[in-house]
Structures are given as structure tokens and as C-alpha cells.
Image (tube, rainbow, N blue to C red):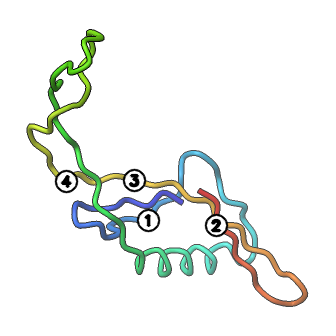
Amino acid sequence: MRIVIDKDGKVAEVHDSPLGASDKDAYSEEFRRSVDAAVRTWTFTPGSLRKVEPGTDLDGDGKPDYVITKSWERVAVYYDVRFTFEIVEGQGVVRREP
């Protein structure tokens, strides 16, 4: 699944990931609805885009020893996650893989 995370860290959209197709079977739609409902309860640290400039070269090696953040803004990001659903000894089991 591809989870789109908005600027506030909330799940805004849930889509099939372009990185891999889901298997289709009699339970596919039910699993898809369950994943959608579950991930919409998740929260994340919002993504951010920083603009930086080089700091001072304190040790004289010709390279700055740090960067200075000049500005930053929150941005929407996405996260692809794989869920595997199985029946193990008569029980539904879900595994998540980033």
C-alpha cells in the first residue's frame, strides 16, 4: 500500500503501491478495507524540507563542519508498506514490512 501523509502527519490517502501488486482472491476487498481503516488511525512526524547553507570550516580541511538551516517547511510525503495476511492455525495473522 502507498500511504500519503499530509503536512500535519495524518494519513490523507491510501492507494495500491506501484512497487508491487496485491494478490487477488475472495478476501482481497475485505483485506483492502481493513488496511485502509487501520492505517488511517496512524500518525506520523510530518515531513519537512529544509533549505541549508554551509557553515564554517573550523578544522581547516576545506569543508564546512556543519550546515545552517535557513528555512524549512512541512511537506506531504508518501510511505510504501507491505502487509501480508495469512491464516495460521485457524487465526488471521497480519505482518507488516516497510
* Residue 85 versus residue 72 in the image, above or below: below
* Residue 84 versus residue 73 in the image, above or below: below
Query: Based on the displayed image, in which of its 4 quarters is residue 11 positioned?
Result: bottom left
- In the rendered view, does 11 fall on the left or right side of 15? left
Residue 35, how many percent across, how many down? 55, 75
Along the line of sight, the residue nearer the viewer: 51 or 93: 51
Which mark is drawn over residue 14? Answer: 1
Secondary structure, mark 4, is strand
Q: Which residue is mark 4?
A: 74
Q: Amino acid at mark 1?
A: Val
Q: CA distance from mark 2 to mark 3?
A: 16 Å
Dot 2 or dot 4: first in sequence order is 4
Q: Amino acid at mark 2?
A: Arg
Residue appearing at x 41%, y 76% in the figure: 40
Secondary structure, mark 1, is strand
Q: Which residue is mark 2?
A: 96
Q: Amino acid at mark 4?
A: Arg
Residue appearing at x 16%, y 26% in the figure: 55
Dot 4 or dot 1: first in sequence order is 1
